[in-house]
Amino acid sequence: MAATAGRINKLFGTDGGLMLSLYPAFPDDFDPATMPLLVTIDALEVPLWCDRFERRGISGATATFADIDTERRAQELVGLEFRIEAPGDEEEDEFYLEDLIGFRAQIEEAGSAARHSGSLTDFYDNEMNPLFEVEIDGRRILVPAAEEFIAHIDFEGRTMHLILPEGLLTLE
């Protein structure tokens, strides 16, 4: 998670420019070409890419952002705190779904108290509908390899927890 790195204080000029306060967590090696300022708007994390960024002393800067080209649009950002996630900050959580073959699977269906144990025996990489093949009690079942069904993956323990829609395990 990126640390809070500053705050958008007030308008600067008439072309959508803004004055920023930079907190001590603001990186010295900030590169506006590769690092956006991350703000939360309506509970969504939104990246703001700088068209222009100019430091003003140790704890200040001015900036203009892509797609923010009027005073009215810039005013909507005033008062927001921003974060910066430098390249390399993100966790190494990238993997291929086929890497999960052989993992033990703990499976539950939404709306049911029943839990099933099995193992992931195959992965079918269909662009429209990628599927896991899971073996449960000698029966092979195809389940969608969708992010919203994967509750947790433990790479060290080689297990995964799936929560599937009700009735999916009983489809023939």
Image: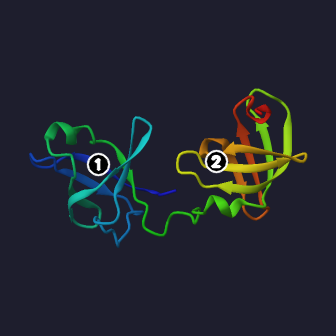
Quadrant in the picture for the C terminus: top right
Judging by the rendered image, the residue that carries numbered circle 2 is 145
In this picture, residue 14 sits left or right of residue 95? left
Give me the disc on residue 8: 1
Q: In this rendering, would 50 be left or right of 16? A: right
**Farthest right residue in view:** 137
Q: Name the element at disc 1.
A: strand
- Disc tally is 2
Q: Name the residue located 73 percent from the left edge and 31 percent from the top edge.
A: 110
Q: Nearer the viewer, residue 48 or 163?
A: 163
Name the residue furthest bottom. Answer: 29
Tags 1 and 2 touching, CB below 8 Å: no
Q: Quadrant of residue 141?
A: top right
Residue 146 location, x and y as percent?
Answer: 61, 45
Task: Estimate the x, y position of residue 94 in percent, counting from the top left.
Answer: 57, 63
Q: SS of the residue at dot 2?
A: loop
Residue at 78% across, 58% down: 103
For image coordinates 42% across by 63% down, the residue present is 25
Q: Amino acid at mark 2?
A: Ala
Q: Is residue 96 above or below residue 45?
A: below
Give the class, few, some or many, for how many residues have Cα within 10 Å of label 2's Cα (few <14, many ≥20): some
Marks 1 and 2 sit apart, C-alpha to C-alpha, by 40 Å
Place of residue 58 in the rendered image (x, y in percent of width and height, measured from the top left): 28, 67
At label 1, the amino acid type is Ile
Q: How are the residues colored? A: rainbow
**Quarter assignment of residue 124:** bottom right
Expressed as whole percent of the image width and height from the top left, the position of residue 3 reads 47, 57
User: Residue reaching furthest left?
Assistant: 14
The label nearer to you, 1 versus 2, is 2
Q: Earlier in the sequence, mark 1 or mark 2?
A: 1
Residue 83 as seen in the image, left or right of residue 119: left
